[in-house]
Each structure stands twice: as C-alpha cells, then as structure tokens.
Image: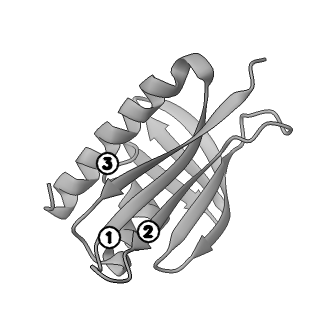
Amino acid sequence: MDDKIKYELEFPIHASPQLLYQYISTPSGLSEWYADNVNSRGELFTFIWDGSEEQAKLLSKKSGERVKFKWLNGEDDEPTYFEIRIQVDDITKDVSLMVTDFAEEDEVDEAKMLWENQIADLKHVLGSA
C-alpha cells in the first residue's frame, strides 16, 4: 500500500464565511456541489456519487470556519481525512476555501482536478463564478 501524500489547495471565493459554512457542513449544502446526494445520521455522513456510496465521519467542525471528515473505508493507520477551511484575510477580508486532502502519489494531480471541478460547481451554486 503506497503512502498517501498530503496536499493543500486554495480557492478564492466571493461569499460570506457564514454562507460558505452551510455549504461545507450540512448534507443539503454538500449535496449542492460535492456529491450527488448526502445523508447524515449524527456524525456519520453518507456521500453518494452515481449510485456508489462512501461513508465519512465528521471528526470536527467549527462554525463559520472549518469541517474535517475521515473516510471510513480507509485503513486505520493511514490519514484519509479531508478538511475544508474557510480563511478570511484580516486586511482585505477576501475569503478563500482551503482544502487539505490526501491522495496516492500518482493520483495527486487527478485529485486536485476533481477538487477544482467541485469548487467550480460550488462557485456556480453561490453565483460567484
């Protein structure tokens, strides 16, 4: 099993942190851009794409700031979480979404492209594209 590599992406977004937080922390918000459908039962989130399901546990969240999920299909000893953080520049008040995720070395570029597509969908939903 190859070790997964951690990578970070930054996406400037024209939206308030409060609004963005709804889209990254709630099943209804996440199903608008991240997956076809999202259900949750407590801390357990089920993400559905084209009929396939992936389950993730909500590890932590901070209102208006960030969410962190751990995929439940991964090995226990490997870091298979992803975090979406809302960053606001103190001076300009510009808002960015910071994504931290992991992928196998030969899949990092593909994984980044997937995030770019998903964030493009989010911007479209927010009307900030």
Q: Earlier in the sequence, mark 1 or mark 3?
A: 1
Badge 2 amino acid: Ile
Rendering coords of residue 11 (x, y %): 33, 54
Mark 1 = which residue? 95
What is the distance, in whole Å, between disc 3 and disc 2 at their CAs?
13 Å
Give me the residue at 32% from left, 75% from top.
19
Q: Are marks 2 and 1 in contact (CB under 8 Å)?
A: yes
Mark 3 — residue? 119
Residue at the location (39% across, 40% down)? 115
Residue 27 x/y as whole percent? 46, 60
Q: Pick whichever, 26 or 74, lies toward us.
A: 74
Instruction: Describe the element under mark 2 as helix, strand or loop.
Output: strand
Q: Is 20 located above or below residue 107 in the figure? A: below
Q: Which one is closest to the eye, mark 1 or mark 3? A: 1
Q: Which mark is residue 86?
A: 2
In the rendered image, which quarter contains the N terminus?
top right
Q: Earlier in the sequence, mark 3 or mark 2?
A: 2
Mark 1 in CB contact with mark 3 (< 8 angstroms): no
Which residue lies at the image location 67% right of the left edge and 68% below the top edge?
60
Q: Is residue 34 above or below residue 75?
A: below
**Secondary structure of the residue carrying numbered label 3:** helix
